[in-house]
């Protein structure tokens, strides 16, 4: 596959995003780094628990001395099976290795993964890794254009290069407006468009209360600056999408 191949995602909010698919090399670099970190964590755990067990006084019953190995087994199990899911949930599709490699996991719809999707994806890692060195996963990735392993198919996810917001160009609809920009909207600046699109692209990543409050503030700012009134029956998000679409379809805002 060509390294610059991209996937076009039509998000539910009518934003078309083109994201570069992460190549096999980037993904293996990330998993190699994560594996080394897992090994380091495992060694540190064994040494810490072993040293702690040796520090116990002789008067401690033998039952308690057996807790060290049992705890080590439990921690090693969590490191092996929980490492990827923990970081991908915490960092929205990124592990330490993925952050270094500049890639992340997203849902094929363009939204962040849910916790359930993340756990399901990583449970399939036990199959993808067979018979060793991710043999099954590698064969699966070579057989599809989006480099998806079995876990990606199960969870409906993609691995893409992590891009800054200003490097992702949204397309608000496919039809360019042939009409002149409304006189009221000429009072808005490119910075206002950036503010609106930043909110629209990030709205599902914030708390619901923060999202509603932010939308209301931006709508109020746009309405006051442009001297227009939002229809009472129209949702704040729909209003802002319409404004952004009109501004984007005007040459001066491209």
Image: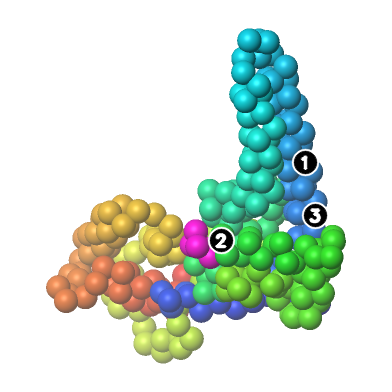
Which mark, residue 118? 2
Q: Quadrant of the N terminus?
A: bottom right
In magenta segment, residue 168: no
Q: Can residue 184 be seen in this view?
A: no
Locate residue 22, reporting x and y percent: 72, 66
Locate residue 188, reporting x and y percent: 34, 64
Which mark, residue 39? 1
Look at the magenta stretch and give its main secondary structure.
Answer: helix
**Element at badge 1?**
helix
Residue 131 vs residue 4: left or right? Answer: right
**Element at badge 3?**
helix
Mark 2: give few (<14), some (14-19) or many (20+) Cα within 10 Å: many
246 or 15: which is nearer to us? Answer: 15
Name the residue beneath numbered marker 3: 29
Locate residue 46, reporting x and y percent: 74, 31
The mark lying in front, picked from 1 and 3, is: 1
Residue 59 vs residue 46: left or right? Answer: left
Q: Distance between the residues labelled 2 and 1?
A: 22 Å
Mark 1: give few (<14), some (14-19) or many (20+) Cα within 10 Å: some
Q: Give the range drawn in magenta.
A: 113-117
Q: Distance between the residues labelled 2 and 3?
A: 20 Å
Question: How many dots with numbers?
Answer: 3
Earlier-in-chain disc, 1 versus 3: 3
Residue farthest to the left, as pictured? 232
Locate residue 238, reporting x and y percent: 30, 74
- Quadrant of the rendered structure where residue 198 is? bottom left
**Element at badge 2?**
helix
């Amino acid at each position: 596959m060509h390294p610059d191949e991209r996937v076009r995602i039509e998000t539910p909010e009518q934003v078309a995003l083109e994201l570069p698919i992460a190549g096999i090399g980037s993904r293996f670099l990330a998993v190699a780094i994560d594996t080394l970190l897992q090994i380091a964590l495992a060694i540190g755990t064994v040494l810490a628990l072993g040293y702690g067990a040796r520090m116990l006084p002789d008067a401690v019953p033998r039952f308690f001395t057996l807790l060290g190995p049992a705890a080590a087994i439990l921690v090693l199990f969590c490191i092996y099976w929980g490492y990827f899911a923990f970081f991908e949930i915490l960092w929205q599709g990124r592990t330490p290795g993925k952050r270094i490699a500049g890639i992340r996991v997203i849902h094929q719809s363009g939204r962040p993964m849910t916790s359930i999707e993340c756990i399901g994806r990583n449970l399939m890692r036990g199959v993808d890794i067979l018979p060793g060195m991710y043999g099954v996963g590698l064969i699966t990735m070579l057989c599809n254009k989006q480099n998806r392993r079995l876990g990606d198919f199960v969870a409906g996810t993609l691995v893409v290069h992590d891009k800054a917001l200003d490097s992702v160009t949204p397309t608000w609809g496919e039809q360019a407006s042939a009409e002149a920009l409304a006189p009221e909207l000429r009072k808005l600046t490119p910075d206002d468009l950036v503010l609106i699109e930043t909110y629209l692209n990030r709205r599902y990543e914030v708390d619901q209360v923060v999202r509603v409050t932010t939308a209301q503030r931006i709508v109020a700012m746009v309405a006051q600056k442009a001297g227009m009134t939002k229809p009472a029956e129209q949702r704040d998000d729909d209003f802002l999408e319409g404004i952004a679409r009109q501004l984007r379809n005007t040459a001066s805002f491209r």
